Image (tube, helix red, strand yellow):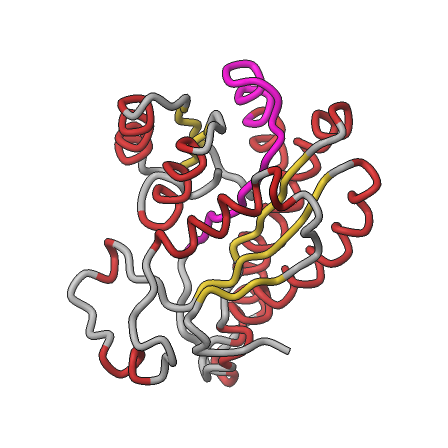
């Protein structure tokens, strides 16, 4: 579980642990936050350990997955939630590097993680891959082209990987949340956003975690190649 030291990732990690998964709580810089999440999971009777590393680095990811397997057992589920800065940039001022920064988090990182975990999944005929996407692909919000392009690329990954990996028992899906306020959004005014949400409320991390938990479960064994939005019908994907 990448990007799990706080926010949405921490809630998903706790959800998966409650469902019986041994959870590798991934982080890049927030070791203290990851340790807190691990402590919470263990206090509730679950299994977890914290693992730090840059999940956009090939060498680091290979070593990271090996460490997880040594401490917690085979990696049979990958939830790619890690993200980096998301600066707003309009076309006249964008550089190619701005696109590459987003692609490294949202395309390169999941690719490296799944590649590293795949031998164990293949050997056991079971695996779950969940990418955390975004409904920004549908919102087409000005200033977000680099971010939206990388998130749109994830949709292609999921569809192709689902066909490639289905024969070895691995499902691949994408969860696309709307705006889900977490700690970094403290004090934000959600009024205007909620006014455009048919369900009439803001989303919560639990809304997303519940879907991720389902997709990782045996009950979702015939669900693959799908992109599922969690946004109260703020957008409706074709």
Work out whether residue 162 or residue 206 is closer to the camera in this orientation and state it: 206
Q: In the drawing, does residue 157 fall left or right of residue 228?
A: right
Q: In the drawing, does residue 217 fall left or right of residue 234?
A: right
Which residue is drawn at the image coordinates 66% and 59% (left, top)?
A: 226
The verdict on residue 224 being magenta is no
* Spot occupied by residue 155 in the image (x, y as percentages of width and height): 65, 63
* Spot occupied by residue 62 in the image (x, y as percentages of width and height): 62, 28
Q: Is the residue 186 above or below the residue 211 in the image?
A: below
The quarter of the picture where residue 208 lies is bottom left
Q: Is the residue 219 above or below the residue 68 in the image?
A: below
Which residue is drawn at the image coordinates 62% and 68% (left, top)?
A: 152
The verdict on residue 71 being magenta is yes
Looking at the image, how many numbered discs can be counted on the residues? 0
Q: In the drawing, does residue 182 fall left or right of residue 106?
A: left
The quarter of the picture where residue 34 lies is top left
Q: Name the outermost residue toward the left.
A: 187
The quarter of the picture where residue 126 lies is top right
Magenta range: 64-84
Which residue is drawn at the image coordinates 57% and 39% (left, top)?
A: 217
Q: Is the residue 120 above or below the residue 114 in the image?
A: above
* Spot occupied by residue 145 in the image (x, y as percentages of width and height): 53, 76
């Amino acid at each position: 579980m990448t990007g799990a030291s706080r926010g949405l990732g921490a809630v998903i990690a706790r959800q998966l642990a409650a469902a019986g998964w041994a959870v590798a709580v991934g982080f890049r810089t927030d070791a203290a936050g990851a340790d807190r999440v691990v402590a919470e999971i263990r206090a509730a009777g679950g299994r977890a350990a914290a693992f730090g590393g840059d999940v956009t680095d090939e060498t680091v990811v290979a070593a990271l997955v090996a460490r997880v397997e040594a401490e917690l057992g085979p990696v049979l589920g990958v939830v790619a939630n890690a993200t980096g800065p998301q600066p707003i940039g309009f076309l006249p001022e964008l550089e190619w590097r701005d696109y590459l920064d987003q692609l490294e988090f949202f395309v390169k990182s999941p690719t490296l993680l799944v590649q590293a975990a795949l031998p164990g999944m293949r050997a056991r005929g079971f695996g779950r891959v969940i990418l955390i996407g975004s409904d920004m692909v549908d919102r087409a919000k000005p200033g977000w082209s680099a971010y939206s392009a990388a998130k749109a690329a994830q949709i292609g990954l999921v569809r192709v990987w689902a066909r490639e990996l289905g024969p070895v028992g691995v499902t691949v899906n994408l969860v696309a949340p709307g705006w889900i306020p977490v700690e970094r959004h403290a004090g934000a005014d959600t009024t205007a956003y909620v006014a455009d949400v048919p369900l009439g409320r803001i989303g919560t991390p639990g809304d997303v975690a519940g879907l991720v938990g389902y997709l990782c479960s045996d009950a979702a064994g015939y669900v693959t190649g799908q992109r599922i939005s969690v946004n109260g019908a703020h957008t409706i994907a074709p």
